[in-house]
Image: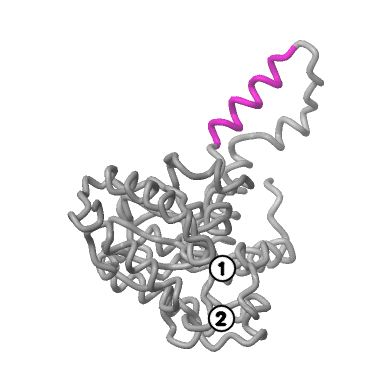
């Protein structure tokens, strides 16, 4: 008779899944059972492998494995799916994600002076998405990303591409202002970014532009210099989440300087324009005459 998972183990598994649910992570993937079968065949066929006792054979039987799979499913069943799962309207889906965040207290920033959550703004069906680091004082006050001096520069950069700010979608890695505009800590990024991944999967952009080192390193999980990260394309698949549209699986991602950095070092604006030209070429866009003069 198959061994049944005891109640304490079920409760522990359910608590762990609820923990990830609170972080905005809903999608979990089971390893393909065929891979496990193939692995067991390789082990059993190896001449130097250990012999399998009768008790061990019974433990590995398909009947027992099926019973355990059913038990695991019953544990997973206590966790709800992503609220926006199956919602085809991106406006409604983004609203559900925002409601799921609530008045977030998942990390320390909730108690370090932030006024409000800065979710994101723009076209929910945008082909182009800009992702920055974190809200600043102006953003925290108005509840919208990139509205301060750096935001004004970003708006001008977007206009130079021949489009309006309202045509793109703008968000940040984290949604709360760090005290004194400090750089977000790694655990803060890890706690908040799953919600951003759900936004990306909902919007389904063709191209993402990571603004600055924090955004680039968090999205790409690469610790490298800006000079090495810029000037190339990355295939980006938002981890831990699947889009409701099966035809959309990834976006192309480019890295450029954060507008706040360009305000401190205007000499790098030409380099940032090169990055944006690369984006425009990918999207089939042509810059207006004034931007090229």
Residue 170 position, x and y percent, is 38, 67
Residue located 55% across and 36% down the image: 33
Residues in magenta?
33-46
Q: Residues within 10 Å of mark 2 (few under 14, many from 20)?
A: some
Residue located 64% across and 80% down the image: 180
Q: CA distance from mark 2 to mark 1?
A: 10 Å
Q: Is residue 42 magenta?
A: yes
Q: Is 228 left, or right, of 211 in this rendering? A: right
* Front position in the image: 18 or 107: 107
Marks 2 and 1 in Cβ contact (< 8 Å): yes
* Front position in the image: 179 or 206: 179
Reading the image, the residue beneath label 1 is 192
Reading the image, the residue beneath label 2 is 104
* Front position in the image: 30 or 183: 183
**Residue 150 numbered mark, or none:** none
Can residue 16 be seen here? yes
């Amino acid at each position: 008779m198959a061994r049944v998972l005891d109640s304490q183990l079920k409760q522990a598994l359910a608590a762990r899944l609820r923990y990830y649910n609170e972080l905005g992570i809903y999608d979990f993937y089971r390893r393909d059972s065929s891979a496990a079968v193939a692995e067991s065949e390789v082990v059993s066929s190896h001449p130097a492998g250990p012999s399998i006792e009768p008790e061990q054979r019974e433990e590995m039987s398909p009947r027992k494995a099926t019973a355990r799979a059913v038990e695991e499913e019953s544990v997973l069943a206590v966790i709800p799916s992503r609220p926006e799962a199956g919602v085809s309207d991106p406006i409604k889906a983004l609203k559900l994600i925002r409601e799921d965040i609530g008045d977030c207290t998942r990390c320390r920033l909730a108690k370090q002076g932030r006024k409000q959550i800065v979710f994101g703004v723009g076209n929910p069906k945008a082909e182009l998405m800009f992702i920055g680091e974190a809200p600043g004082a102006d953003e925290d006050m108005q509840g919208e990303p990139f509205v301060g001096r750096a935001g004004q520069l970003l708006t001008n950069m977007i206009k130079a591409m021949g489009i309006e700010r309202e045509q793109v979608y703008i968000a940040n890695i984290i949604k709360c202002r760090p005290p004194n505009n400090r750089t977000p800590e790694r655990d803060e990024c890890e706690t908040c970014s799953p919600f951003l991944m759900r936004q990306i999967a909902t919007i389904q952009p063709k191209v993402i532009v990571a603004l600055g080192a924090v955004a680039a390193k968090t999205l790409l999980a690469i610790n490298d210099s800006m000079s090495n990260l810029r000037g190339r394309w990355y295939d980006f698949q938002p981890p831990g989440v699947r889009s409701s549209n099966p035809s959309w699986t990834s976006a192309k991602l480019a890295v450029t300087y954060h507008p706040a950095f360009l305000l401190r070092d205007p000499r790098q604006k030409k380099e940032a324009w090169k990055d944006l030209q690369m984006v425009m070429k990918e999207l089939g866009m042509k810059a207006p005459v004034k931007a090229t003069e």
